[in-house]
């Protein structure tokens, strides 16, 4: 009998894990309203860091726009990388009429220098106005990888909204510690199970208890795996992950060995967590 319970609990757990892996889950389609602009620094940012959100929004029919503020010309490959970006966005599903690459003298790919916030705001503003953008998505202050160009973007976007229109929502992609960044397949499973607990915890409770007993595990709860309050999640299934992988393959000039390791192990290929950046409303003078 104990063996039977053990087998049934393992089988049930495997079914749940496969369901969590293959089924996309997201909150982004409810949180990100109106016309949405993805603001990136370099070609390949869109698929290396933002693919789960792009796929969720585009699958739901949300109008998504892409603005990349450089051609990534640090190695003299600017025209090649700009063309690769176009092919990547074709794979992800953003049409040519909703995507742009900027080649600005003060916004060049640079590993050591931050970009000026006012310059970013000036370049960004016409794209926001002309396309009636309601939500901007970009990096947070950590820039995911720590790249100074990435880290400049939230300051530039916030500067624009502070000066012109604080009604637009600005969301930034959460930067995780190094260990958490490279959890690979565990990332979507853990993130989806965290969301699923809210919906089906009573149903799962008996099976989880049986599994613990079968393996004589300690029955006290583990430390909480819930996401910090207020984050908006987009979590890819296998099909969306493969789409992101195909988009990355469009960046042929960047496919060195360590980027293959990245696409295999990075949580950002599977999971995006977003935090809304509040822009203070100017007080009436």
Image: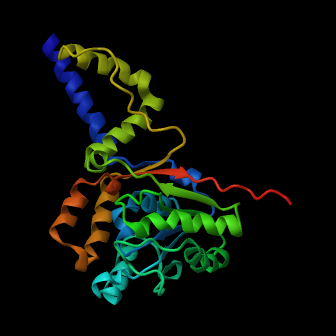
Residue 242 located left or right of residue 158? left
When the figure is inspected, residue 172 is found, relative to residue 37, above or below; the finding is above
Q: Residue furthest right?
A: 285
Residue found 40% across the figure and 57% down from its top: 52
When the figure is inspected, residue 150 is found, relative to residue 14, above or below; the finding is below
Residue 62 seen in the figure = no
Residue found 52% across the figure and 74% down from its top: 116
Q: Position of residue 100 (x, y in %)?
A: 49, 81
When the figure is inspected, residue 183 is found, relative to residue 51, above or below; the finding is above
Q: Nearer the viewer, residue 252 or 19?
A: 252
When the figure is inspected, residue 121 is found, relative to residue 180, above or below; the finding is below
Quadrant that contains the N terminus: top left
Residue 146 seen in the figure = yes
Residue found 47% across the figure and 30% down from its top: 198
Q: Position of residue 152 (x, y in %)?
A: 48, 67
Q: Position of residue 101 (x, y in %)?
A: 46, 82
Residue found 40% across the figure and 35% down from its top: 194
Q: Residue furthest front?
A: 112
């Amino acid at each position: 009998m104990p063996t039977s319970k053990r087998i049934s609990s393992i089988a049930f757990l495997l079914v749940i894990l496969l369901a969590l892996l293959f089924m996309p889950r997201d909150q982004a389609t409810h949180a990100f309203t109106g016309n949405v602009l993805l603001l990136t620094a370099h070609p390949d940012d869109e698929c290396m860091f933002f693919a789960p959100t792009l796929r969720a929004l585009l699958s739901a029919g949300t109008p998504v726009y892409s603005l990349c503020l450089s051609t990534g010309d640090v190695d003299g490959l600017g025209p090649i990388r700009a063309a690769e970006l176009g092919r990547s966005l074709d794979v992800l599903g953003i049409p040519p009429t909703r995507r742009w690459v900027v080649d600005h003298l003060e916004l060049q790919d640079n590993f050591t220098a931050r970009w000026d916030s006012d310059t970013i705001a000036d370049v960004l503003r016409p794209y926001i106005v002309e396309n009636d953008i309601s939500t901007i998505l970009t990096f947070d202050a950590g820039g995911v990888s720590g790249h100074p160009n990435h880290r400049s973007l939230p300051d530039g976007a916030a500067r624009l909204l502070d000066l012109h229109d604080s009604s637009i929502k600005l969301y930034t992609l959460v930067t995780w510690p190094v260990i958490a960044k490279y959890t690979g397949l565990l990332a979507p499973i853990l993130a989806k199970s965290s969301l699923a607990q809210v919906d089906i915890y009573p149903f799962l409770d008996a099976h989880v208890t049986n599994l613990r007993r079968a393996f004589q595990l300690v029955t006290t709860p583990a430390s909480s795996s819930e996401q910090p309050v207020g984050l908006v999640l987009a979590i890819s299934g296998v099909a969306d992950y493969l789409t992101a992988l195909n988009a990355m393959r469009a960046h042929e000039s960047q496919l060195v060995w360590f980027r293959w390791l990245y696409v295999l192990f990075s949580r950002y290929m599977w999971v995006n967590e977003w935090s809304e950046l509040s822009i203070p409303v100017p007080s009436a003078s």
